[in-house]
Image (cartoon, grey):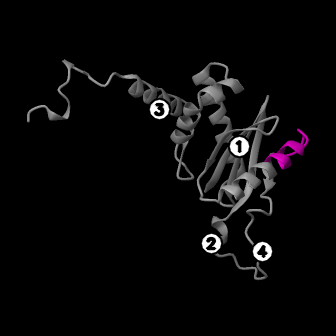
């Protein structure tokens, strides 16, 4: 399960924070600063996977048996650095890190198609589109779509629905929900 998707710029300013598990605001703020500090300090030659910082890591027990609850706890940070932005996914141990890297790649490519050469300002001024793309790909922490064309078409369809005038219908002006009463 995916617990959070985060996007930071090179200065550590969050451009997107989407948590799929409930956390106190103070814990979220500490987590954001810790994760960015860890990710930004890594050299570009390092792998893109990290263990979760102790702030959210599940407590270690002395028994060697694993319970289903321990598989549900966030434990892995997967990230990619593109130009001036860090794309970060926090997940449980049941998610494949390579699949999460692919998810980040599809997310970035979808943004690039929608904005035609995406930049940080696009993310700032069109944050609704960021959330729409994410909602097409992830629902409740579960990845539901990774097909680039389907994701982009779904977001564009949402934009067409949002821009349609309220009284538009096939035959001209509509009488609304009260028609025929």
Whether residue 43 is situated above or below residue 164 in the rendered picture: below
Q: Secondary structure at mark 2?
A: helix
Which percent across, then down, holds residue 160? 41, 24
Which numbered disc covers residue 154? 3
Tag 4 near tag 3, CB within 8 Å: no
Where does the C terminus fall, quadrant-wise? top left
Residue 129 tag number: none
Label 4 sits on a secondary structure element that is: loop
Q: CA distance from mark 2 to mark 3?
A: 34 Å
Residue 118 is left or right of residue 36, and the answer is: left
Q: Nearer the viewer, residue 178 or 117?
A: 178
Give, as a single range, the part of the protein colored magenta: 36-47
Q: What is the distance, in whole Å, between disc 2 and disc 1 at their CAs?
A: 25 Å
Which numbered disc flags the more N-terminal residue, 4 or 1?
4
Q: Which residue appears at 79% of the width and 30% of the height?
A: 84
Q: Residue at x 20, y 24 (%)?
A: 174
Quick one: label 4 or label 2, which is nearer the N terminus? 4
Whether tag 2 and tag 3 are in contact, CB under 8 A, the answer is no
**Residue 170 percent location from the top left of the image:** 22, 20
Q: Quadrant of the N terminus?
A: bottom right
Q: What residue does disc 1 label?
A: 101
6 or 106: nearer the viewer: 6
Between discs 2 and 3, the one toward the N terminus = 2
Label 1 crowd bin: few (<14), some (14–19), many (20+), radius 10 Å = some
Q: Nearer the viewer, mark 2 or mark 1?
A: 2
> Considering only vertical position in the picture, is 106 above or below 19?
above
Secondary structure category for the residue under label 1: helix
Q: Which residue is mark 4?
A: 60
């Amino acid at each position: 399960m995916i617990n959070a998707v985060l996007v930071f710029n090179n200065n550590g300013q969050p451009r997107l924070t989407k948590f799929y598990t409930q956390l106190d605001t103070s814990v979220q703020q500490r987590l954001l600063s810790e994760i960015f500090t860890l990710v930004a300090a890594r050299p570009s030659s390092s792998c893109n996977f990290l263990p979760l910082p102790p702030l959210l890591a599940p407590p270690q027990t002395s028994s060697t048996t694993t319970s289903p609850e321990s598989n549900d706890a966030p434990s892995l940070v997967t990230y990619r650095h593109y130009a001036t932005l860090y794309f970060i996914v926090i997940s449980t141990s049941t998610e494949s890190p390579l699949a999460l890297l692919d998810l980040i790649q599809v997310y970035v490519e979808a943004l690039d198609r929608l904005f035609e050469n995406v930049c940080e300002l696009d993310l700032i001024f069109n944050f609704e589109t960021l959330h729409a793309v994410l909602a097409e790909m992830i629902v409740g922490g579960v990845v539901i779509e990774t097909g680039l064309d389907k994701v982009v078409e779904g977001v564009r369809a949402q934009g067409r629905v949002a821009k349609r005038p309220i009284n538009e219908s096939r035959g001209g002006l509509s009488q609304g929900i009260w028609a025929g009463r």
